[in-house]
Amino acid sequence: MLNLPSQISEAADYVRQRWTTTPRVGIILGTGLGNLADHINAELRLDYQAIPHFSQSTALGHKGQLVCGHLSGVPVVTMEGRFHLYEGYSARQITLPVRVMNELGIELLIISNASGGLNPNFNSGDVMVIEDHVNLMNDNPLIGINNDQLGPRFPDMSSPYDPQLVELALSIARRENFMAHPGVYVGLNGPNYETRAEYRFLRGIGDAVGMSTVPEVIVAAHTGLRVLALSTVTNMCYPDAPEKTEGNDIIAIASAVEPRLRSIVSGVLARIDS
């Protein structure tokens, strides 16, 4: 972690040389949710391969570019596609963009993902507002010698997801008349989907399961950022009546639900100073 400050500075400087606005919000768009970037008044688009020290996004449905501009009048920097452990990257590589966005000046990080529903009260197409997580990814971006410039050795994780933003997101969903649940997200490495036995186990500890988000949230807590995380439930994980899970089907469902997430994001941005 000792060489991270120089990598962060080089990547942030590269962006600043091309976009002088200070963003207030960073957004990470997950599987099937990239269409939200089309609603940003974009002033700069950068392929990840052009940004120093950024990895390449190889996941299905992830475009792999940084979009800088305004959304609902708020300056934002948006990752159109993210990185995952299953792509072969370390947790530190996955989370470098969060540190870069923090260096650029964001105050709030909004994360979206697609997930499998564990809670039997959920349905495919519902939105889950993440209020906590369980890390079963067998990795952590903070492992190694800590650099105190970046954050404390032992960051507090008692409330990594901002409770006020969770309530705000749920209230927006109620106002817009679509289903959104608070819930616990379980992070696994992937890339395979879970077995029936794993579904039974995971149901006891969480409401939805996915292969992302947890590393980014840990780093956001390390840097002191507020976090709002939204998960699209794209399929239900029934251990006793399993259905075959296909990646393209997940993308299709996530894309269909994207307007709901966009309404939450827009509503939150409208209240960013409250």
Image (tube, grey):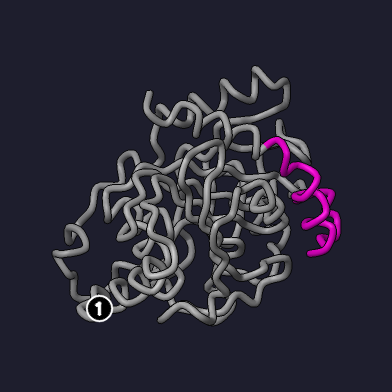
Estimate the x, y position of residue 192 in percent, counting from the top left. 69, 70
> How many discs mark residues in the rendered view?
1
Residues drawn in magenta: 238-260
Considering only vertical position in the picture, is 207 above or below 45?
Answer: above
Estimate the x, y position of residue 63 in percent, counting from the top left. 67, 68
Tag 1, which secondary structure? helix
Estimate the x, y position of residue 123 in percent, counting from the top left. 77, 36
Considering only vertical position in the picture, is 34 above or below 90?
Answer: above
Q: Magenta region's main secondary structure?
A: helix
Q: In terms of depth relative to the viewer, which is nearer, 112 or 246? A: 112
What residue appears at the point 38 percent right and 23 percent down from the top-left corner? Answer: 274
Estimate the x, y position of residue 198 in percent, counting from the top left. 64, 58
On screen, residue 201 versus residue 219, left or right, reads: right
Q: In terms of depth relative to the viewer, which is nearer, 49 or 133? A: 49
Is residue 269 rendered magenta in the image? Answer: no
Other-residue count near label 1 (Cα within 10 Å), few / some / many at <14 / 14–19 / ≥20: few
Which residue is at the far left?
Answer: 148
